[in-house]
Structure formats: C-alpha cells, structure tokens
C-alpha cells in the first residue's frame, strides 16, 4: 500500500464530484437509466470549460450512492459533503455554480451549509 495523499494534494486536488452511473437488472430505479452518463458528461464539460477538470476537481463515475431515483442521477461533492439526487443534465450548471461559483473560484472550500442549493 502507498499513501499518495501528499502527491494528490500537491498536484492541486481540491474537490471530488461523484456521479452515480450504476445500472441494475431489477425493478428498482438506477441512475444509469436516469441520465447517469449524460449527467457525468455535463459535469465534465462544465469543469473543462473552466479548466479545472482533473486538475483541481476530480470526477468519478460511481456505483450506487444510496439516493436512487427514476427521475435523475445521484451526485455527491466531497470533501464538502454535499449530496444531490434526481439530477438531470440541465441541472448541472446550477448545481456546480452553487457549489463552486460561476467561474469555479470556490474550489476547496470546506463544507458549508450556507451554500445555496440550486432551485429545482
Ligand atoms: S443507483 Fe444511483 S444512487 Fe443508487
């Protein structure tokens, strides 16, 4: 095992956006069928436009985040500890602006409950 925490921090890591793209072969809702891939692409595009995709903000497709819905995808933003469900691609700009600011100038900000969640 290697502890690479310092290396990741030195490369400029500030935040991690997790996008559930989980699929399941059952009657229960899963994000893969609720825009999971499209939400991931929208997150990546928003971050690329601000030149922080995988430089400061890492993005990962994940398995189930425990917020399953047929209406949209689950997204978590860490280490600030923010959780969303029912996210559709059109929601992504408002979600990321609420978290990171319009120009992604609020990266690495500690968890703050005063961050205004985007309006549904
Ligand atoms: S399948 Fe995405 S949160 Fe459960």
Image: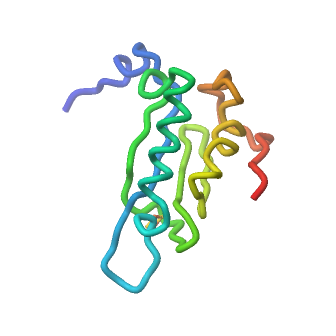
Write down which quadrant ligand 1 falls in: bottom left
Side of 95 where 72 appears, left or right: left
Near-viewer residue (1 or 38): 38
List x then y, in percent, for residue 1.
19, 32
List x then y, in percent, for residue 45.
50, 35
Side of 65 where 87 appears, left or right: right
Determine the residue positioned at 39% across, 43% down: 60
Residue 3 picture quarter = top left
List x then y, in percent, for residue 118.
75, 49
Determine the residue positioned at 35% across, 68% down: 23
Asked if 58 appears above or below 13 in the picture, the reply is: below
Near-viewer residue (28 or 115): 28
Side of 49 where 61 appears, left or right: left
For this orientation, the residue located farthest to the top is 10
Residue 108 picture quarter = top right
Determine the residue positioned at 40% across, 86% down: 27
The total number of labels drawn is 0
For this orientation, the residue located farthest to the bottom is 27
Quadrant in which the C terminus is drawn = bottom right
Residue 88 picture quarter = bottom right
Asked if 15 appears above or below 36 in the picture, the reply is: above
List x then y, in percent, for residue 19.
46, 51
Determine the residue positioned at 40% across, 15% down: 11
Near-viewer residue (63 or 39): 39
């Amino acid at each position: 095992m290697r502890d690479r925490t310092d290396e990741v921090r030195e490369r400029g890591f500030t935040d991690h956006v997790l996008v559930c793209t989980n699929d399941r072969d059952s009657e229960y809702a899963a994000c893969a069928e609720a825009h999971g891939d499209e939400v991931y692409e929208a997150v990546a595009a928003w971050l690329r436009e601000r030149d922080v995709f995988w430089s400061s903000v890492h993005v990962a497709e994940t398995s189930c985040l425990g917020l399953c819905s047929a209406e949209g995808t689950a997204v978590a933003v860490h280490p600030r500890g923010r959780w969303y469900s029912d996210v559709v691609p059109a929601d992504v700009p408002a979600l990321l602006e609420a978290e990171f600011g319009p120009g992604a100038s609020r990266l690495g900000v500690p968890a703050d409950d005063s961050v205004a969640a985007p309006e549904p």
